Amino acid sequence: MSSYTSENSEELKELDWIRVQTKLNDDYKIESLKERMIRKVKENPIIPFGILATTSALSYGLYSFYMGNTKMSQLMMRTRVGAQSFTLLAILGGWLIIGKKNN
């Protein structure tokens, strides 16, 4: 009779492990690159706007430089620096907010 309870307890331990493993698998699902990008944009939607502003200012500034419009080129390079600063502050702000949520 003691062997029966020993086998029974072993089965229960095995079943507990299966439940724990299933819960862990549910918490840590593998996501595709597209799903991850969508999740990240939903977490902090300001960062893509900053990236777009930085890229636009850089592109137009380089185009102006190529066309010989030095005043506009200089203005766009200054705008690019401002957009990069904005993006960096958005990233740091997002980290602070996420850090406070986890604590």
Image (tube, helix red, strand yellow):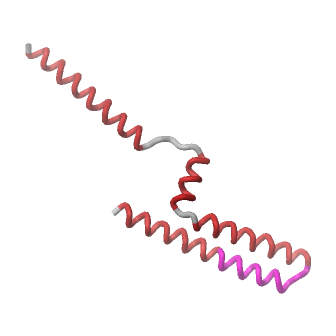
Q: From what the image shows, is residue 89 above or below residue 37?
A: below
Q: From what the image shows, is residue 15 above or below residue 36?
A: above
Drawn side of residue 47 relative to residue 100, left or right: right
Callout count: 0
> Residue at horizontal 12%, vertical 15%?
3
Q: From what the image shows, is residue 53 above or below residue 8?
A: below
Drawn side of residue 68 relative to residue 98, left or right: right
> Residue at horizontal 38%, vertical 63%?
101
Residue 27 is situated, as x and y percent measured from the top left of the image, at 40, 43
Give the main secondary structure, helix, strand or loop, of the magenta stretch.
helix
Residue 65 is situated, as x and y percent measured from the top left of the image, at 86, 77
Q: Residue furthest bottom?
A: 71
Drawn side of residue 9 relative to residue 70, left or right: left
Question: Which of the two residues, 2 or 34, is positioned nearer the viewer here?
Answer: 34
Q: Residue furthest right?
A: 67
Q: Quadrant of the N terminus?
A: top left
Q: From what the image shows, is residue 77 above or below residue 27?
A: below
Q: Quadrant of the C terminus?
A: bottom left
> Residue at horizontal 55%, vertical 74%?
89
Q: Which residues are magenta?
A: 68-83
Quick check: is 59 in the magenta stretch?
A: no
Rendered image quadrant of residue 97: bottom left
Drawn side of residue 73 relative to residue 43, left or right: right
Residue 34 is situated, as x and y percent measured from the top left of the image, at 61, 48
> Residue at horizontal 66%, vertical 67%?
51
Residue 17 is situated, as x and y percent measured from the top left of the image, at 29, 31
